[in-house]
Structures are given as C-alpha cells and as structure tokens.
Image (cartoon, rainbow, N blue to C red):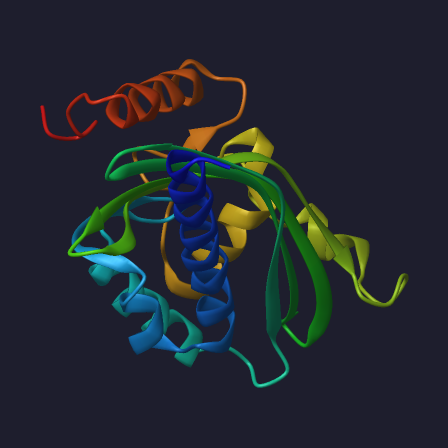
Amino acid sequence: MDNDRIEQAVARSEVLEVAMRSWVHRDRGDWDELIDCFHPDARIVNSWFEGNAHEFIEGSRNMMSGHDPSDSQKHFSGNRRVDTNGERALCEYYLTLHQRRRIDGYLFDLQTWSSVLDMFERRDGDWRVIGRWTIYEKDRMDPHKPGKVPASFFEDMDLSPFPEALQYHCWRNARDSGRMPAKGIVVEGTDRARDTRAAARAWVEGGPLPWSG
C-alpha cells in the first residue's frame, strides 16, 4: 500500500472518530470535550439553531439542564462516508435520535431520522468540525404505554407552525424551551438540501466556505 493511501486511511479514521465522539459527548453532557470537536469558528445548522458551534453547545447545556430527571436521549449513526482532500474532509452519515421525555406527566418515545453533513478541516495536525448541517427526513412521537395518553393530548397540539417532516421534533423544542425552527433548517428532498450538499462538496474540492459570501 502506498503512502498516499495510508495517509488517506488515517485521515478518514481520525475524522470519523471525532464525528462519532461528538455525539457521545452531546448525549452525556460532556461539554468541554464536545467543544474540543469543533474549531472556534465552526458553524452549525440544525432544527433550532443556526450560528457558531460553541454558542450552540452553550445553548445545549442550558437546554439539558431543564429536562426532567427521567428524560434520556441517544444518537445512533450509520452508513458513514468520508472524502478527504488535503487538509479538508467531508463526512456524511445517517443519524437517528431516540428520546424518552416526560410531558405533562405522560411518558413519550420520540424518534428523529436525519443525515448529518460534517465539514472537517485539519489545523495544526488535528481534525475538527468547521461546519455541520443536520438534514432532516422524518420524525414520530408515541406514548410509552399505549392507551395511557388521552386522545385530546394529540388533538390539542398545534403543529401548523412547523415543517411537516419534523412537526413533533419542533413542537417539543418550542414547548420545552421556546425555540422555534431555525431559519436555515434543512429538510431532505428540498432545494435547500441539494444546495447544502453541493456547497459542501464545492468546499472540500477547494472552494470557499458556504457561509463566507
């Protein structure tokens, strides 16, 4: 195996390690370790946030501090793909969020399916995220114990302000913390999703950062 292939394999391994570790730190609330996965000028766009990654982490810390003690969440990833080009890399993977939440005394299980698009840059020998988009596909919300939640609970939910593909996820965010969907939220199958992937691809091939212009 030639040195170039070895270097690419090492780079892909290091990129994947940081990407996957970031979600473990997010679920555990390891905030200092999570910050270390992102460059100081990194940008994040997800369901409720659009801006600097370190500001997002601080917002996440505040959000989790208000959860019920019985709440839990885990992110699971799969089908990871990494492309490298010198000091830049693009990593995309599927992500499923599983949550247990207590709302108005009832327990619910919520799932959100998405793809994550991570742009990585190597600085001083270390790979860290410089840009992360979550591209949402669908979600659902189910009573933990069927029949224990009255039909009126769902009938009274106003889902109209939220993207159809992500209504329960966004409703939960708005109810818990008053956070409405981010202006730049990305939903699978839309022009914005295609443009986001195209911009990230152009960047890894040597173009400008998507948000620099």
Left of 130 or right of it: where is 155? right
Front one among 148 and 14: 14
* Most distant residue in the top direction: 191
Could you tell me which quadrant the C terminus lies in?
Answer: top left
Residue 119 against residue 33 in the figure, above or below: above
Left of 128 or right of it: where is 52? left
Left of 78 or right of it: where is 185? left
Residue 10 against residue 204 in the figure, above or below: below
Marker count (numbered) = 0
The quarter holding residue 102 reads bottom right
Q: Identify the residue at horizontal 44%, vertical 43% (top origin).
A: 6
Pinpoint residue 48: horizontal percent, then vertical percent: 37, 49
Q: Identify the residue at horizontal 39%, vertical 64% (top origin).
A: 177
* Most distant residue in the right direction: 147
Front one among 123 and 2: 2
Left of 28 or right of it: where is 107? right
Residue 94 appears in view: yes
Pinpoint residue 130: horizontal percent, then vertical percent: 24, 45
Front one among 93 and 188: 93
Q: Identify the residue at horizontal 42%, vertical 13% (top origin).
A: 191
The quarter holding residue 8 reads top left
Pinpoint residue 82: horizontal percent, then vertical percent: 47, 36
Residue 61 against residue 149 in the figure, above or below: below
* Most distant residue in the front direction: 2
Residue 4 against residue 176 in the figure, above or below: above
Q: Identify the residue at horizontal 30%, vertical 35% (top origin).
A: 183
